[in-house]
Amino acid sequence: MKTGNDILQTAVKHLGEQYIFGASVPKNKEDYHGPWDCAEFVSWCVYQVSGALYGCDRDDANPATADAYTGDWDRDAKRIGTMIDVERAAQIAGAIVLRAPTGNGDGHIVISDGQGGTVEAKGRLYGVVRDTLSDRHWSTGILIPWVDYQQGLQPVAIMPPTELYRAVPPFPRGPRVFELQQKLARLGYSTGLLDGIYGSVTSAAVRAFQGDAGLVLDGEAGQRVFEALDNALAAALPAAPLVGALPAGEAVHVESCAKEIVLDDTITIFKLSDREGFFYQGRMTVDADGAPQCYHPEPDDNLGLDKLEYATANSKRFIQGANGIGPAEGFFVSQTSLQSGPGNHCDSFVDAENIPYIVFYGEKKFPEVKVGDVAVVVSLTTGRRTHAIVGDGNNGTKGEASMKTAGNLGLVSSPRSGGDMHFNYIYLIFPNSKFDPVNPPPHWPDAKIKALAEARFATWGGMDQMRRCFPQIP
């Protein structure tokens, strides 16, 4: 009977040969010498030793044309093979070790050398090489039923990956994924929303990069992917850092504030490691709160700038011209979290039509940011920006701003029909930037907000730094 060691020695004879993803290999051609892909290489070695197909689309097909695939290896392992744990496969020469494909990436397959190493058709950058089972993700070990195997006497330690991101629920998230997305974007690979979540789109971008870089094509990101990205960026970056930006080697290094503040399923807040300013990516729904004509009590609900159903109880306490004071008689006194003065007076609040403000979570949920702190909002699609102030708060925003903010960015500013529901906006808030309200009203003048926000933004690094973090900005 043929042995696992025969499979290994057959594989060793082809070290150094070429890899091409998707290469078709005639399994019955004894003198074949590449190109290979990973599954074709292992299936060819098995056929050369045993005369039988395994891991092919049809194992009863013509061996000259049978197509091998890691998904077929997964199928055959469950149907006609012996599945063993990877630690045991690491001790068995010629055992097969498989990373099964998922919906978001291809798999990979190798031949164990019985000592914790591998022989494999690894990628275009490597060709057929020896490598290790450690620090990599695997699904199972496989023994071919008509092959005789001998397990080594000494146990082999297989170390798990120190860092690995896969697009499987619950999807990995956090600042390291955000950094990965930024690096891919800077190299021209679309990860969709830069949200710090390793989903299917990010996995597809990783796979595209792996293909271009000649790495293993599996859509998974570990230390080797990060190293390859850093090398690619080092080759692409200018020699000198941009003015006001981080040095080239740290251009997109981010760390989450307070050990990753995830405020809901969509928004994660980050800060650069060496400067003040919290930022997140969100949509832009339009808020009319604080505007004198925001809400009207008539039941037809067409007179106010916004629908009455969105008014809080506080915004329905006072009516201008009755128990409230303001220029729009018959309308409610719409209130905002930013307030200076009595609740029945429109001048006590920040006017959405005339003052650029953003809506952010209450201070209990995110105490680092205070109502009244200044901010800058940047459009990822146009590159336009506006100054703003944190003028209102709620417990569920994924990106919301005043009518004035939306208009400053070139959006339709109607709360009923304007804004942008795509996550196309970066909200950058500067902590400890709140200023005392001025008199006479408006208490938070547009010009003063602009001066303070632009000064903080320049210190942060301005648009140069923003483009370093979000290179898709025009």
Image (cartoon, rainbow, N blue to C red):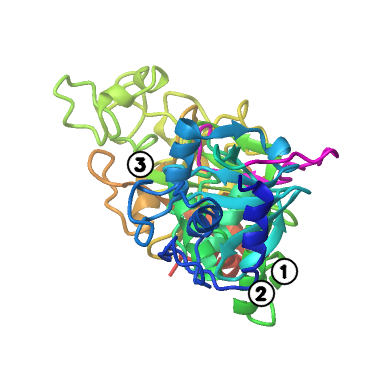
Locate the N terminus by quadrant.
top right
> Residue 345's x, y, as percent?
42, 29
How many C-alpha atoms fall within 10 Å of the one at disc 2: few (<14), some, or many (≥20)? few
Range of the magenta residues? 148-170
| Disc number placed over residue 285 in the picture, else none | 3
- Secondary structure type for disc 1: helix
- Secondary structure type for disc 2: helix
Comparing marks 2 and 3, which lies closer to the viewer? 2
> Residue 147's x, y, as percent?
59, 42
- Label 1, label 3: how many angstroms apart (C-alpha)? 36 Å
- Up the image or down, 432 lies above or below 303; here it is below
User: 166 or 290: which is nearer to us?
Assistant: 166
Q: Which residue is mark 1?
A: 249
Q: Residue at x 53, y 69 (%)?
A: 19
- Secondary structure type for disc 3: strand
Q: Residue furthest left?
A: 300
Chain-order first, disc 1 or disc 2: 2
Q: Residue type at mark 1?
A: Gly
Chain-order first, disc 1 or disc 3: 1
Chain-order first, disc 2 or disc 3: 2
Q: On the rendered structure, is 368 left or right of 212?
A: right
Residue 164 part of the magenta-drawn span = yes
Residue 353 part of the magenta-drawn span = no
- Label 2, label 3: how many angstroms apart (C-alpha)? 38 Å
| Disc number placed over residue 290 in the picture, else none | none
Q: Residue furthest front?
A: 1
- The answer to the question of whether label 1 and label 2 lie on touching residues, with beta carbons closer than 8 A, is yes
Q: Which residue is mark 2?
A: 234
- Up the image or down, 309 lies above or below 166; here it is above
